[in-house]
Image (cartoon, rainbow, N blue to C red):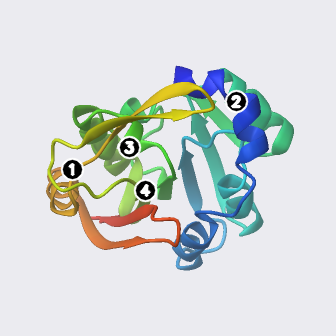
Amino acid sequence: MQEYDLIADWYASERVDQTGVPEALALVKALPTRARVLDIGCGHGRPITAALVAADVQVVGLDSAPRMLARFRLNLPATHIVRGVAQTLPFADATFDAAVAWGVLFHLPQAEQIKVLASVARVLTPGGSFLFTAGDVGDDSGHHTGMMNGIEFHYYSFTIEGYRRVLADGGLDLIDFHKDTGENGYYLAVKSA
């Protein structure tokens, strides 16, 4: 997203907490050693990608923002990274055992989120897991805007049942939803076998 390029330096200095790390580590705990994990919207690589790398899984980062990718290369030079968009993941079918998308989907309009879910389902192995953050709005028309470091961002969401429906349409089963102490909503889905 172009907006993240505009705030790349600020974001790198502000995103220093461990939000999302416990959820990402819980996801990979169930995976075999050296499993392949895709970090969609990896940004500068901290803290999620770094935690995944430390958990001894093979991580590939994906982001569309060149300035974020440049910071990622400085932070995690030995970790593979690809420039691309989540709607059309540039990987072969059944490449990854799991995928994580922290702080990504809710920036995309609902039609684009549906494309992401289908793209993720395509690159996951049967039984592969997908952990992503998104809102839980009262109705499926959920859209609002907000500011981050003086830049306007758009936020979109389905209801939990809306996500259950669009995940199922893409071949993924929603198995869990919870919020952390900061009210971030975590969805865990598994690709049908």
Percent position (x, y) of residue 75?
Answer: 83, 43
Give residue 68's quadrant in the image: top right
* Label 1 or label 3, whichever comes before in sequence order: 3
Disc 4 and disc 3 in contact, CB within 8 angstroms = no
Helix, strand or loop at label 2? It is helix
Q: Residue at point 81% right, 45% down?
A: 76
Residue 106 numbered tag: 3
Q: Is residue 40 left or right of residue 112?
A: right
Give whichever of discs 1 and 4 has the lower sequence position.
Answer: 4
Tag 3: amino acid: Phe
Which numbered disc covers residue 170? Answer: 1
Asked if the residue under mark 4 is in contact with the one under mark 1, i.e. CB atoms within 8 Å, the reply is: no
Point out the tag, 1 or 2, that comes first from the N-terminus. Answer: 2
Q: Nearer the viewer, residue 133 or 13?
A: 13
Q: Residue at x 45, y 65 (%)?
A: 183
Q: Amino acid at mark 4?
A: Phe
Badge 3 element = helix
Would you call the spot at circle 4 few (<14 residues within 10 Å), some (14-19), or many (20 or more)?
many
x and y, in percent, of residue 6 in the image: 64, 21
Q: Nearer the viewer, residue 82 or 7?
A: 7
- Among numbered discs 4 and 2, the one appearing first in the sequence: 2
Marks 3 and 2 sit apart, C-alpha to C-alpha, by 18 Å
Query: Where is mark 4, residue-wise?
Result: 132
1 or 4: mark nearer the eye: 4
**CA separation, marks 1 and 3?**
18 Å
> In the shown orientation, is residue 182 left or right of residue 108?
right
